[in-house]
Image (tube, rainbow, N blue to C red):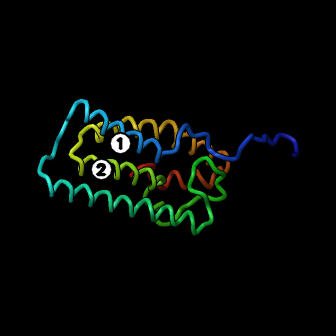
Amino acid sequence: MSGGEEVSDTDAAKVIALPPVLHLGSVLAGILIHWLWPLPFLTWGVLRVALGLFVISAAGALVMSAFSLFRRMDQDPSPRTPTPRITQGGSYRFTRNPMYVGLSLIQIGIGIALGNAWILILLLPTCVVTHYGVILPEEAYLERKFGDEYLRFKSSVRRWI
């Protein structure tokens, strides 16, 4: 190494957890809490389930489009792996985090479909943990690795929506 270059133990963001695990845990906690202390809403049966499934489907399409863009670029979507380049096409033109937006919408859809307000309530702490424990470390990593290129992308595309 030439003078002044710092070597890290890994070339990846130091995230506290994987977002799919955070959302799954949040949904499961919402189901458990609902079982202990029911907090139902939207009791209109079939229409509620249809609306929830629509939201899940649309959000799933968003997640899958971002995931497939990563795969086409031969890039691992896990925030715990090195990022070879900044992903800017597809849904990344509208949000810097389409997979996290999609996971949040999937959680909303599940809450709606099940008529379970706890799942929706638990989305807030899940998003806070995702923001501080995943997104901010990812952004710091990308700024260190890509510098001005990432700062330009960051200034032109919203973090969430």
Compared with 79, 62 (above or below) is: below
* Residue at (46% x, 40% y) in the render: 130
The disc labelled 1 sits on which kind of residue? Val
* Residue position marked by numbered label 2 in the rendering: 110
Asked if residue 53 lies left or right of residue 126, the reply is left
Between 161 and 123, the residue placed more toward the observer is 123
In which image quadrant can residue 26 be found? top left
Looking at the image, the residue that sits furthest to the right is: 2
| Proximity of marks 2 and 1: CB atoms separated by less than 8 Å | yes
* Residue position marked by numbered label 1 in the rendering: 27
Between 79 and 144, the residue placed more toward the observer is 79
The disc labelled 2 sits on which kind of residue? Ile
* Residue at (20% x, 35% y) in the render: 39
> In x, y percent, where is residue 33?
29, 33
* Residue at (51% x, 43% y) in the render: 135
Identify the secondary structure beneath mark 2. Answer: helix
